[in-house]
Image: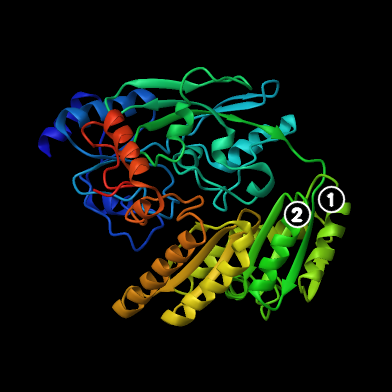
Amino acid sequence: MNDLHAALTEAGITAVTDGDILAAHSMDHARLVPPGRAVALVKARSTEEVSAVLRVAGRLGVPVVPQGARTGLAGSATAVDGAILLDVSPMDAILTIDPIDRIAVCQPGVPNAAISRAAAEHGLRYAPDPGSWETSTIGGNIATAAGGMCCVKYGVTAEYVLGLEVVTASGEVMRCGRRTAKGVAGYDLVRLFCGSEGTLGVITEATVKLSPIPAERLTLAAVFDTTAAAGRAVTAIMASGAQPSLLELIDGVHLRALEELRPMGLPTDAAALLLVAADADPEAELVAIEGLCEGAGATEVYRATDATEADALLESRRSAYHAMERLGTVLVDDVAVPRSKLAEALDGVAAAAERHGVVIGVIAHAGDGNLHPNIVVHPEDPASVAAGKAAFDEILEMTLAMGGTITGEHGVGMLKRDWLAKEVDPVNLAVQRRIKEALDPQGILNPGKVLAD
């Protein structure tokens, strides 16, 4: 440890070693993933500092855990024993907004929402918008291949990343990708780093694609007596050829928790609410979608009367996780199933909750088949934790049996690393291990994440 601090100091790096500060930085929002004991925290302010830290770590064989805002839900930013916590959130500059090429060049610590605010004066936005967009950073969004509310129409983070600057495990600085709208020279290393969760390199700059702000958006909410009926409405909407810009499901557990957190007249006696937005020909689209919801069994459908009411509904959806935290510690599942299986998956989650005697609320990017079953447990009660984990595992088993995936947007981290081998075939897993070994031969970058030992 003394050798590490001496080497960091010699390299011009200031490290924090205070135990309380290290503990405060040792976890993300995966509260049931136990952290290891880090030995130092470095708040990097430049690519050069990131490079210097990795060179020291490589020379001494010290693990490095890259971090940003730590809003992740899979334990990707959780400390491991003996690690340097490498916090890149101070690197928070938007370097370029180019309205002609429709790109933004950002450092990794820029909050997601800040990019859209900066681009708005040019009539542009950064489309991916995870629920934590006010606090989650673009570096973390890329590292976890984040999704968001508008993915159903506009796609996920990886589709918007054009170029990256990455510091490798050896401390070398590499650029990959491009600023142009098209380009296929060489292997697509940008896509390799999207979703790599800090295990292959540390992102220090990103070039992302901007798109025009829609001229108009209209919003409706449809209320259902059963989550399965809401699921059937989703499949009907997607089968119809409609292109909603947002299609979110909020179940009754969340509706009640949200209303308790911030009263706004949500239908707390409902089993589910579908929140739908359209922005192409919004009036015509919503008329059609309203009919499909009623045909699937909606008991009530109402339109947001103005942008303020629509924004309030969307903000309520963004607050769903925090509303559930008031009930206990939340074990967040993040699965995606084929859209045709959505209603069946919702029934399966309800059955798992009843079977294991736990409270599970479901929110979903329903148009993508991406469900977030939020399982409430009480860490002081071992039986509660065991029941919650059993329900968590059952939901993952069900998802794979349906041809789905164990994570739609939160990543594998530590929470699901043992499940990756159940989803991908042995050859696939072996290739992933070889990629990791090629880029990080010492295994110092975020060890224990994504791939099980």
Q: Secondary structure at mark 2?
A: strand
* Separation (CA) of disc 2 from disc 1: 8 Å
For the N terminus, the image quarter is: top left
- Which residue: 63% across, 47% down? 151
Q: Element at badge 1?
A: helix
Relative to 113, does residue 403 appear above or below in the rendering?
Answer: below
Image location (x, y in percent) of residue 441: 23, 31
Residue 204 location (% of width, % of height): 42, 29
Left/right of residue 393 with respect to residue 80 in the rendered view: right
Number of residues whose C-alpha sits closer than 10 Å to that of mark 2, classed few (under 14), some (14–19) or many (20 or more):
many
Residue at image mark 2:
277
Instruction: State yes or no: discs 2 and 1 in contact (Cβ < 8 Å).
Output: yes
Q: Which residue is mark 1?
A: 282
Give the residue drawn at x 41%, y 57%: 29
Q: Outermost residue, top direction?
A: 185
Which amino acid type is shown beneath numbered disc 1?
A: Pro
Q: Nearer the viewer, residue 32 or 397?
A: 397
In the drawing, does residue 419 fall left or right of residue 271?
A: left
Question: Quarter of the image holding residue 378?
Answer: bottom left
Instruction: Quadrant for residue 397, please give it.
Output: bottom left
Residue 347 located left or right of residue 410: right
Q: Residue at x 82, y 67 (%)?
A: 302
Residue 238: assigned label: none
Q: Is residue 209 left or right of residue 69?
A: right
Residues 270 and 398: in front is 398
Query: In the image shown, does 185 or 314 lie closer to the viewer?
Result: 185
Q: Is residue 263 visible?
A: no
> Which of the two labelled residues, at mark 2 and mark 1, occupies the earlier sequence position?
2
Disc 1 crowd rating (10 Å Cα; few below 14, some 14-19, many 20+) is: some
Tell me the kind of residue under disc 2.
Ala
